[in-house]
Amino acid sequence: MESIAGNTVKTKAFKEKANKILGISPEDARLSKSYLTVAFIALLLGGFLGLLQGLNRAGMLELPTWLNYYQVLTAHGLLLVVVLSAFFTIGYFYAGLSHTLGGLLPKVRKMAWIGFWMKMFGFVLAVIPILMNEASVMYTFYPPMAASPIFYIGLVFIVLGIWMCSFGAFINVASWRKANPGQHIPILSFFATGVFVLLFFGSLPVAIEVFMIIPWAFGWVETINVMVARTLFWAFGHTLVNIWYMTAISAWYVIVPKIIDGHRWSDLLTRIVVIALVIMNITGGFHHQIVDPGISESVKYMHVFMSLAIGFPSLMTAYAMFAVFERTARKKGGKGLIGWFKKMPWGDVRFLAPFIAMAAFIPAGAGGIVQSTNQLNQVVHNTMWVVGHFHLTLGMTVVMTFFGISYWLVPYLSKRVLTPQINKLGIVQTIVWTLGMVMMSFAMHWAGLLGSPRRTSYTTYNDNATALGWDPYLFFLAIGGTLLMIGVLMQVYAVFNMMFFAPKGVTEFPIADEEEGAAPTPKWTERWGLWIVLMLALVAMAYVIPLVGFLVDAPPGSPPFKTW
Amino acid sequence: MRQAQYGLVLLVILILPPVANLLESIMITHMHMQMPLLVLAGFLIAKFFQIKYPQFFEKWNANGLPGLLLFIIITGYWTIPRTMDETLTMASVEAFKFFSLPFLAGVPLRDSWPKLSSFWKNGIIIFFAILYLGMGWLYIWSPEQLCNNYLLIEQITLGWGFLTTAVCMVIYLGYSYFIDFTQYETES
């Protein structure tokens, strides 16, 4: 027993040394760098389009006739919700797989490259009709609004690219497990496995939806079942939200403790959080359909429980995070009920950005609970409130964590270092971004409560008094949006500086260890096949109720509409 | 012992009239949510009986097969459409449901499962997969309403619920047949 433990320690020490001296292989680094480059270019373009929208909504900018609000909105959504998040997630986790599993298999690397170019090709196909104003259908693209068929064909390639990367990750993890029997998948790769499982199974329903839409968009079939399409979309849409979220919390659980010089919280709890999120996630889509027709009140009521159940692992995460902070700070001599807070490394952007991201999830999560509650949803449904909510969750909780990650991941990949100047820039960027996002999302929430609709170009509704009452908040929104654009420019500058111009050097991939003497994690956590079957059973149970009704008692289908 | 308490709490919650009414108002949640949750409650409560009466289980369920048989009889009984109807119209049958599923299905399942060989474990999953395929076929393609209390569309929904659950069981069987766990889990 002792010799096994001794061997494990030795192997670990050897691996750590090898990683320290050699770092990531150039091939693996190139792959992740390419993904991150696309992600941050998407941030730049998407951020700029966001600014245009914010200024338009505040009535300060009239868009030219050749570029209307809905075109900008569709492109903004697609660039940030699909491209930025997916490319960052894949780039980050592939670097994590490479680091924790001892390099990517050549076959897997090839798959990730094929996936990369498939996504790029699909993305170009999708963007062309958007630029031609043939696909201003928003990133949710559900019928009866119909875009040019080319747009949907582009989406097919994006999904295929994502599947390539998912299967690549599965192959790498399976091969590592075969070579290391009896060992747990390293924790960051465990998160990666969960994320890729969700990416694959979550994009299945949207793939089915797109295959329903394509013949309809071409005009080969006359009508489409709108409710089925919406339901399939949200099975994917909500899962995507949680894919970003799981990517972000992987850094909170695994990376942040190392940065503050602490240890990871319970390994078992971490793995249970991942498993719970994987099993329960997809059915969360129903809370986006809480005012949709065709689903009975009692079914919606039960889905509120289902959605709140997804909130439970988040509460576990919140507890775990603050426990790690307090324990680490007290070890460093922090005293008092909250006085230990002063001992946290506030001047380190790699900590500050994810910390503010976590703090933002407190109001963001609370807003989410409001929206998934039946009666409250009816007040805020399709208003600016919802936009404020997902700018807090995605724009702050997730993206600020991504920014925090970039300050060590990019130099790690480019074999450079984070200089004090860039760290300072990062701190300022974090503050600018926080101010901008707090202002903008507060204004959005408030305007939403006052009834301002989302996804609507600027209008005063013939100078109606209620609509004019939104103006001060929308103005506030534009100021926030402008600050965010400054934040985007600083962030993109920092990323490309660290990628190409920072001084050469060694940057560590910070993965925290468990506490000494931590109880071993039980083996059952590794039964991925079982978790997937449980997930499928839950999805089947949840979706069979409305889908059978939508299909058997189907209303007349809808022809395609072009509303713009 | 704590899980026995959780099981009891779960059972009490499921018996509460508003909860029972909600779950019984939809056919598929009646059969595929309330009933399995009742079994789960019994599964958790079983720990109490196992500690309190070890000789009883030793004497009557030494190799796990009697418990398994009881579990199959009880759960099989509750897949019959008419039994669901009766729980909604007769209080005594409703009471029998709340007693039989936890104590005559959940408890024996907990006691039997670790005693069974993988032959029997897989056998029972295969049995239920076939049973569920059959029930799915019956509920979907039956030309008539099988329960007086539920509409035809609910019946068809339940049928698809049976079929999809059966498919999940088949996937699990395939997974455990094709994947050799010892390759991944035994330390070298």
Image (spheres, helix red, strand yellow):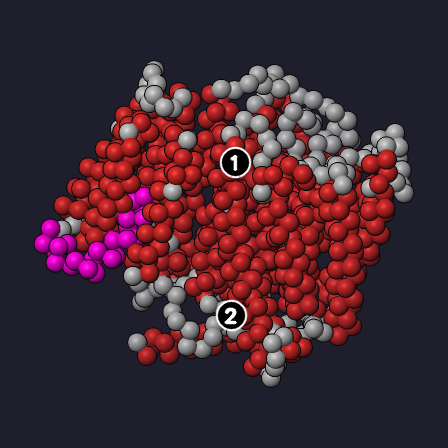
- Give the foreground label among 2 and 1: 1
Between A387 and A182, the residue placed more toward the observer is: A387
Tell me if A459 is positioned left or right of A316 in this view. right
The image position of residue A117, as x and y in percent, is 63, 45
The image position of residue B86, as x and y in percent, is 28, 28
- What residue is disc 2 on? A264
Q: What is the chain letter for disc 1?
A: A
Q: Quadrant of the C terminus of chain A?
A: top right
- Tell me the residue at 71%/63% (across/down): A499
Tell me if B122 is positioned left or right of B159 in this view. left
Q: Which residues are magenta?
A: B38-60
- What residue is disc 1 on? A300
Alpha-carbon neighbours of circle 1 within 10 Å: few (<14), some, or many (≥20)? many
Please say whether residue A397 is visible from this viewpoint.
Answer: no
Q: What is the chain letter for disc 2?
A: A
Choose top left, top right, bottom left or bottom right for residue A156: top right
Q: Is residue B39 magenta?
A: yes
The residue positioned farthest toward the bottom in the image shown: A333
